[in-house]
Structure formats: C-alpha cells, structure tokens
Amino acid sequence: MAEATLSDDPAISAPAPSENAPPDTAAAQEQSELQKQVARRRTFGIISHPDAGKTTLTEKMLLLGGVIHEAGTIKARKADRHATSDWMDMEKERGISVTSSVMQFPHGGRVLNLLDTPGHQDFSEDTYRVLTAVDSALMVLDNAAGVEQQTEKLMEVCRMRQIPILTFINKLDRDGLPPLDLLEDIEETLGIETAPLSWPIGMGRRFRGTYSLAGNELHLYAKKRSEQERLDVTDLQDPRLDDALGADPADQLRFDVELVREAGNDFDLDKYRAGEQTPVFFGSALHGFGVEELLDTFVEIAPPPQPRPTTERAVSPQEDDFSGFVFKIQANMDERHRDRVAFLRVCSGRFQQGMTLRHQRTGQETRTGRAMTFMAEEREGAEVAWPGDIIGLHNHGTIKIGDSFTAEDTTLVAADEELRFTGVPSFAPEHFRKVHIDDPFRAKHLGKGLTQLSEEGAIQVFCPMHGGSTYIVGAVGPLQFDVTIERLDAEYDVAATLGAAPYERARWVEAPDTKDGDALLEDFKNQFETNLFTDAEGSLAYLARNDWRLERTVEEWPRLAFHATKEHV
Ligand code: G4P
C-alpha cells in the first residue's frame, strides 16, 4: 500500500478573496468573511455504542480545545442524567442536555461544532436526527467489542446521507481484539472500506503506542499525557524504532505495517467524502492518547459545511442570505417558561442576534431576540453564527421538526423564493404502546397533547385507520414513553397510562404512481385493516407484529413501497 496522503479541502486552502485584493465594498467584505468562516467550520456528531468512550473522548477534545479545564465535567453531567427519574429531575436532565447538546471548540485554527447524539436510555429519534444536521461523523469503537448494535443503527442513517465517517478505535490500553480483526469487523458489519492511518504497537499492558502510516511518526504511549512523546522517523527501517521500542516490538511493527500496506486500502479522500471509506485511528481516550492526532487529521480531511437540498434547489453555505432548518426540539429546563428550544442548523449566510426570520411553513415573521448560541467562549448571547453553527430558538409550539427559516429581509424573499430544506425525516419507531385514559372527558386534551408531542418529534402517534379512540404511540427509544406520560400530566393535565401494544415494526406505505395504484392500495387496506393506522400528519402506516411478519408482507406486496423514514415537506 502506498503511503497515505492527506490533502486539504480546496475551500480551505484557497485564499479568501480578501487576502489578495482589498474588498472595496461592504458586500464584498461580508462575502469574504462568510467564505472564511465557512471554511473554518467542521460540524460533526459521534456515533458509538454506550460505553465505547464517547463521553471520555468528548471531554478530552474539549480539554485540548481549552473549553473546559478539568477532567470530569462532562462525566458528572452524564452521571446526573442517569441517576434521576422524577419530573423535576427530568426537567433538569433536559436542561442539562440543552447546554451539552452542542459543544463548540477550536482545533488547529478551525472551529468544531460537536452535536451530541444521546445514547443509553436517552436513545431516541433525536439521536438519529442529529445526524441530519452534521457534515461528518466520528465513529468510536471499543477495541474489545468491535461494532455493536447502536453503532450499526446510527451507521444506517449515515449511509442514507452519505456522511463521511472517521473511526477511532478506543481503549488500546486494555486487551482487545487484534487490530486486523477489528478492521474486518467494520468492513463486514458496516459494509464500508477501512483505511488505517495509524497502527497500534501492542495492546493492554503491552501497549507501546502507535505508528502513523501517513507521516512516519512514532507516537509513544504513557498513561500521563505529559509523558507521551512524538518521534519523527525516516521510515520503518529507522534504528530509532528499535531504540524506542526494543528490537522485538519494532520488528513486529515492521511486519504488521508491511502486511497492512500490502493487504489494506490506501486512504482516498474522495471515497471518505462519499462515505465509502473510513480512515481509522487507534488510541486511548482515557489517557488522552491519539486524540490530538485524530483531531489534527479530522480538521484537515472532514468536510466544511456542505450545500443542503431544498424542495427548490441546493443552498450553498456561501450564499449571502441567512437560511437554516430545525432538526431537534427540546423542552426548556426553566419551569417558569414552558417554552421549547428549537435547534436550528445554519445553512447559509450570517445569523445576527435579533434579526427577523421568516418561518417558511407558516409564512410568519419571527424575532430572534433571545436566540441561544453555543460559542466556545461565551455559551449564550453571542452575536453571530455562521453556516455549520447551531442556534436555539425559543418557541411555544409553533415550530416543528424540519421547519426552515430564512432572513426576512433578503433578496430571496423579494424574489418570493420558498426555501424548504429536505432530508430531516421521521424514523420508523421501534417501540410501541397503547394509550389509556381513565377520564374520557380528557380525550380531546389527550389528542392535542399527543399531536404536539409528536410535532416535537419525541414520539409518533398512530390512530386506527378506521377510527376508534385507541391511540398507539411509537418511539425509537423507550425512555420517550416516560417523558410522554409526565408531560401529558404536567402540560395537558391528562392522566394517561401506557399498556403493551402488539407491534414491533412500522412502515409508511405508498401506492405506486400507476393507474391501478389506488386500487392496489385499497386491496392492501382491506386485507390488513387491523394493522393500518394514520400518523399525526394523516400518512398511512403499517404496524407489524414482528420482523418476520413485516418481511412477509413486503414480499407479498412487491409493488407497494414500505418506507422506514418519512420526509416532512
Ligand atoms: P460512553 O460515553 O460511550 O458511554 O462511554 P464513557 O466515555 O462513559 O466510557 C465508558 C467507560 O469506559 C468508562 O468507565 C470510561 O472510563 C471507560 N473508558 C473510556 N475510554 C477508555 C480508554 O481509552 N481506556 C480504558 N481503559 N477505559 C476507557 P466506567 O468504569 O464506566 O466509568 P468511570 O468510573 O471510569 O468513569
């Protein structure tokens, strides 16, 4: 295998126009500032299975970025989250996750926005949806466990959107699977090519460090970060390797690297950017080993903010006019203000605190006087945000997941262009419950509450196709059910309980666009009456008892489309 080379993004290496010629107008100055800010941004999420080390790695990245100064800050928040269950604590829990949902930190002259992908019991549709707002992902694997279930699920979403993925294999200070087996596991389980950029020397108690395949650099491990060393070597034959590692480990390294270079894949920036290949690093988040090396490469190869599709056209981040979309809505922690925070990803232009936005779905103007920003130094109240950044808009239930916003005062609006971003779908729920209420007079409130909660995207609501008052609620993660019951009680004064529902899978069903399409769908409806429901937007959904039943139905009705995701336009 040839040595991997890391080329930079043209958007980054190309000098901004202002660096060559002084801009002569305010507009040109603004455009060059915008280009510079876009080129600096890297917006990403972490995909991992619980306990692989996401929190530890996040903390180490924030420490390196100088955003926190003490290990344990993020961990303490995580511990808080899981020790609590009553309503006030849930409020707090959500409040905490509002502020840790978006973490901005600097590295290598770039600005990184890390969007939290909640795991453990918090795993929900939000976890998936966060990935619709990133430009790339970091996959963290435990070296003893390899690819695990939650990583696989999240990877499906990355694949849907062709999100580039960089891999960090963690916990090399512990014994785990042989590195080649881990690469094979990634390739086979996730169907993505691997390209190792570093190679581990031993593991567990015999872990000595990593060898950088791209830069001929030896990185010597020590538990304390201050004792870790980087050593430049000419190549694998350099005798300094023997001096540093001892003759046997050095020979083993030579053997391993030759094998990997022969049998493995070259790093290919285009394949990585297309989501077809994942560059791999090895390290130990706990001891801060390999984290800087990972970030150094990440900021070079990960894509800056990318153009985003809308119903009309793709919107480039370099466009002057502000635009963005909402990918997540979360209840606010402050009990006195039962409002919600809508997380908006900036897609183009500059966001200025206080600017007036147009809410594209309703056509209404929205003032953003109190928008939350998540800046590295100043968490709230910063004045501007650029493409790739996230802002939090306060709202009282008028904003839905997937909603688009543009600047009110723009050339776009003058031209009456409607920009609605696509690609923020609902994901088929995987857990289902039947809703019961004791007091039938609260049925209307229950309906209202469930509809609003489903608009926030925490749960999905299904009504039997042929009427009836039994609601079925579906969620991607079961914690959402507890939240639903608590919020129905607190916000809608509805005492509801949830019982078992005999479903495990859901699919949105669509007839083919042919003459007989409607008739075909009618046949299907007649046959599956008891399994058919409408969701809060009136779309037809098929709920299946289990995987086997779903597969049979899909096979038996090859001309109908069964969708695992649903776009909101
Ligand atoms: P998560 O957010 O992905 O769920 O994982 P988290 O960082 O919380 O890590 C899960 C456990 O794995 C923690 O141990 C953490 O200390 C440990 N861990 C993370 N990275 C490494 C590593 O590089 N090497 C080793 N040896 N361990 C690592 P814990 O016992 O659950 O928690 P704690 O008591 O250590 O905080």
Image (spheres, grey):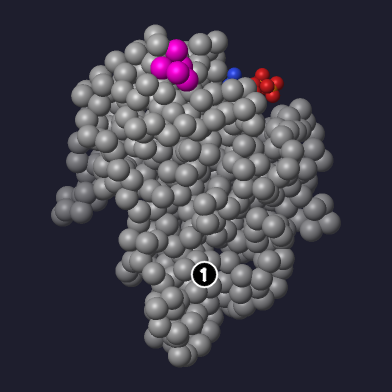
- Can you give x and y, in whole percent of width and height, for residue 305 in the image? 43, 59
What is the chief secondary structure element of the magenta stretch? Answer: helix
Q: Secondary structure at mark 1?
A: strand
Q: Which residue reaches farthest left?
A: 515
Amino acid type at circle 1 is Phe
Image position of 111 with respect to 472: above or below = below
Q: Is residue 133 left or right of residue 63?
A: left
**Quadrant location of the N terminus in the rendered image:** top left
Q: Residue at x 35, y 13 (%)?
A: 252
> x%, y% of residue 144?
48, 15
Question: Could you say where residue 47 lies in the image, as x and y percent from the top left?
Answer: 48, 36
State yes or no: residue 517 in magenta: no
514 relative position to 166: left or right: left
Is residue 533 toward the left or the right of residue 85 in the image?
left
- Tell me the quarter of the picture where residue 116 sits: top right
Residue 101 visible here: no
Q: Which residues are magenta?
A: 242-246
Looking at the rendering, in which quadrant would you find the C terminus? bottom left
Quadrant of the displayed image that contains ligand 1: top right
Relative to 147, say whether 45 is above or below.
Answer: below
Q: Is residue 105 visible?
A: yes
Instruction: State which quadrant residue 216 falls in.
Output: top left
Residue located at (76% from left, 44% from top): 91
Q: Which residue is mark 1?
A: 405
At which x and y percent is residue 345? 52, 59
How would you rate the neighbour count of disc 1 (Cα within 10 Å): few for under 14, some for 14-19, many for 20 or more? many
